[in-house]
Image: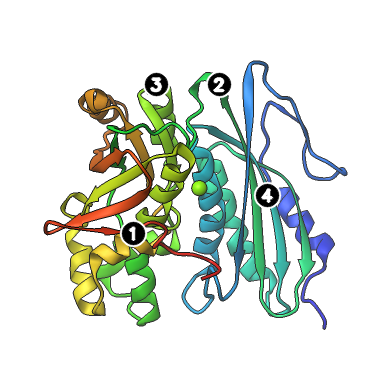
């Protein structure tokens, strides 16, 4: 099948648009990119794949916002360790229907997010796919080893916190599916789905504080992501339903869609807020520090407990919610 544009033209566009960085010795154009590794720092590497029809729907996802999201969801994984994103690689397997204008808009969005975070595009690949398009992004980051925050450090007694409203992206997706994406009332929720914001500055502040024991980003919903932290740390968790931050507009959308706002928060996924644990005695100190440095409020939603499993306490009843979030192979 004829493609409207050859691979060389696509690479030329990407190369022209790619940024640079002081540590980058060779970017796009040779067999490998080459960058200097700063001494006394560790490198972080993460990759994520988005498949048309599974992770995005072209019926309502404009190319610019999709480009932004492809960059943001990967940068979010660097933020989840407290790292600084530096370089990105982009591999596109494009369905025959894609044209140059679509790709230009996608690249404008992708590169805008990289620029917002000082990330240089250093390589990638383009191939033709059969029917669905596949977007694969790799992001490299760096940080001081001593500041690294993994999923592993949660201890019984720790308070579990999240960095913002939950369920917003799931509500946005539901509204897009109902054809309500353009209604002014729902723009915050729709934007949360189409164009999520990676929490890099907050992740750095939390890591540098030295007060956070375990952290990850909320990609699959609180139920599943907290279960990951608990499994890696060898502990359990108890979440209080009435402490989960739900915005007024989310509650309104839930009524329109006939959904539970709490289910969206627990199982919806793609919020890309940060989830982390802090010693009980340090919560107030951390909240003050974060408010001063980033202007952000933090929300305590529960507690780490002995044993295993994630439990939700709602109206005096306890039920297990471990891994009840979005799961790809369910
Ligand atoms: Mg993650």
Circle 2 packing at 10 Å, graded few (<14), some (14-19), many (20+), is some
Q: Residue at x 70, y 80 (%)?
A: 131
| Secondary element at tag 1 | loop
Q: Nearer the viewer, residue 167 or 37?
A: 167
Earlier in the chain: of badge 1 and badge 2, it is 2
Q: Nearer the viewer, mark 1 or mark 3?
A: 1
In this figure, which residue is indicated by the disc labeled 3? 210
- Taking the view exactly as shown, the residue that stands out farthest to the top is 40
Q: Residue at x 51, y 71 (%)?
A: 330
Gap between marks 1 and 4, in whole Å?
A: 45 Å
Q: Residue at x 37, y 64 (%)?
A: 268
Earlier in the chain: of badge 1 and badge 3, it is 3
Question: Residue 144's mark?
Answer: 2
Circle 4 packing at 10 Å, graded few (<14), some (14-19), many (20+), is some
Earlier in the chain: of badge 4 and badge 2, it is 4
Earlier in the chain: of badge 4 and badge 3, it is 4
The percent position of residue 70, horizontal first and vertical second, equals 56, 57
**Residue 181 seen in render:** no
The percent position of residue 45, horizontal first and vertical second, equals 64, 40
Please state the total of marks drawn on the protein image: 4
Relative to 275, 254 lies left or right: left
Quarter of the image where one finds residue 87:
top right
Q: Is residue 249 above or below residue 292?
A: below
In this figure, which residue is indicated by the disc labeled 4? 17
Gap between marks 2 and 3, in whole Å?
A: 12 Å
| Secondary element at tag 4 | helix
Q: Is mark 2 within 8 Å of ligand 1?
A: no
């Amino acid at each position: 099948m004829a493609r409207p544009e050859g691979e060389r033209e696509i690479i030329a566009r990407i190369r022209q648009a790619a940024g640079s960085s002081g540590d980058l010795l060779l970017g796009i154009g040779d067999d490998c990119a080459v960058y200097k590794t700063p001494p006394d720092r560790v490198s972080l590497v993460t990759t994520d794949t988005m498949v048309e029809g599974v992770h995005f729907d072209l019926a309502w996802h404009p190319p610019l916002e999709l480009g932004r999201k492809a960059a943001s969801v990967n940068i979010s994984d660097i933020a989840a360790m407290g790292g600084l994103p530096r370089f990105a690689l982009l591999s596109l397997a494009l369905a025959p229907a894609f044209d140059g204008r679509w790709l230009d808009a996608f690249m404008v969005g992708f590169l805008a997010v990289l620029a917002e975070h000082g990330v240089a595009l250093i390589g990638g690949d383009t191939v033709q796919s059969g029917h669905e398009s596949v977007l694969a992004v790799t992001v490299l980051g760096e940080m001081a080893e001593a500041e690294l925050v993994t999923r592993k450090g949660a201890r019984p007694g720790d308070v579990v916190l999240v960095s913002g409203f939950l369920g917003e992206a799931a509500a946005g997706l539901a509204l897009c599916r109902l054809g309500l994406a353009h209604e002014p009332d729902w723009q915050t929720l729709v934007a949360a789905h189409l164009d999520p914001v990676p929490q890099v500055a907050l992740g750095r502040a939390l890591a540098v504080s030295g007060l956070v024991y375990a952290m990850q980003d909320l990609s699959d919903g609180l139920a599943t992501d907290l279960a990951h932290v608990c499994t890696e740390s060898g502990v359990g968790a108890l979440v209080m339903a009435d402490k989960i931050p739900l915005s007024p507009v989310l509650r309104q959308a839930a009524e329109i869609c006939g959904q539970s706002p709490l289910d969206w928060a627990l199982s919806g996924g793609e919020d890309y807020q940060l989830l982390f644990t802090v010693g009980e005695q340090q919560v107030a100190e951390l909240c003050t520090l974060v408010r001063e440095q980033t202007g952000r409020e933090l929300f305590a939603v529960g507690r780490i407990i002995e044993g295993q499993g994630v439990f939700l306490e709602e109206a005096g009843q306890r039920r297990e919610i471990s891994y009840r979030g979005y799961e790809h192979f369910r």
